[in-house]
Amino acid sequence: MKKLICAALAAFFCCAAPAVTAEAAWKQEAGGSWQYEKPDGTLATGWQYLDGSWYFFSGAGEMYTGWQYIGGDWYYLSSDGAMRTGWVQVNGKWYFLAPDGRMRTGFVHDGGGWYFLDGSGAWTEDDPESHVCLSENGKVMELRDGILYVDGILIANKSYPLPADYAPGGLTAETQAAFGQLQNAMAAEGLSLWVASGYRSYDYQAGLYRKYVNRDGKAAADRYSARAGYSEHQTGLAFDVNQVNDSFADTPQAKWLAAHAHEYGFIIRYPRGKEGVTGYQYEPWHLRYLGTETAKAVYESGLCLEEYLGIDSVYSR
Ligand SMILES: [Zn+2]
């Protein structure tokens, strides 16, 4: 009987493709907990991607279910063990799980709307703009007119998009003025600097992203281009300079910017080696205006903006 259940479950799990080898098998212990025996006869432990879903097994090989705190984050595993993503309702409360399974708290944007999840991850039904919370390193996060601010800094990244109708129409006056000073300082060193791509509207970004997806596919496009609403170019506080390609990194201009841009209020927004945090590959040409005080603090911290503010940059789906 146990064998039958086991076979039925295995068949259910591998309905998409016959990924399970003849030797690998789900097994149920006398105590009722499930294990997954690998072809070499050892039990699966830790996170395992099996037949299209993620599962988590203890060091002894026991499959986990329900809420689990793993590696500093909460995850929700169904009664069949599969890791859940998106919205889940547990004991009458709604929770949101990122595509990598981590339970979210605080402000979440999904399906065109904002939600506020309390410290336990439960959705609170009142207006998200009535809430304030702290980022992972204690910076104040608040939502005003559909725009997320952390420590007073306007954010546009993969977790926190801008409203479609947010349209400064160009670089802000402050950004433009700071760029002028930066440009003059570089000219004095014999280095030319120009804006290759400045402000982009929501609709323009939508067309750009669509074009890249058609050319390179969604996964590749997401590494270098933002979906509409998620681009920093829509803020009027960010722009690309000179050659927008990898060869720019080796130019004297790029080296000067990396060392001095913060003195004029700018940061290299997507630094090398931080793709896992910012959500974007290294872009030596993309500058973000923060004002001299904040830009200097971020530069001196050696952190990218997300790390400095204690926030993440991950699409909700
Ligand atoms: Zn850019």
Image (tube, rainbow, N blue to C red):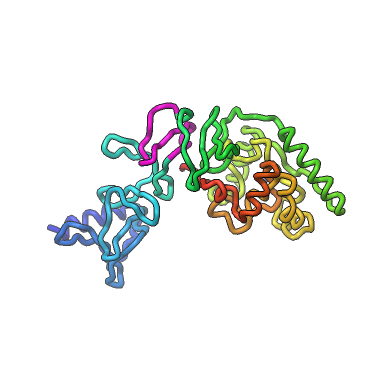
The image quarter containing residue 197 is top right
Q: Position of residue 127 (x, y in %)?
A: 44, 27
Horizontally, residue 305 falls left or right of residue 56, namely right
Residue 288 on image: x %, y % = 67, 44
Numbered range of the magenta stretch: 106-127
Identity of the residue drawn at 77% across and 49% down = 242
Please tell me how many numbered marks the rendered image carries: 0
Q: Is residue 111 left or right of residue 44?
A: right
Residue at x 67% of width, y 50% of height? 268
Which one is in front, 224 or 182?
Answer: 182
Q: Residue furthest left?
A: 1
Q: Is residue 19 above or below residue 112?
A: below
Q: Say whether residue 279 is visible.
A: no
Which residue reaches farthest bottom?
40
* Residue 113 position (above or below residue 150): above
Q: Nearer the viewer, residue 35 or 76?
A: 76
* Magenta span includes 284: no
**Residue at (25, 60) in percent of width and height:** 62
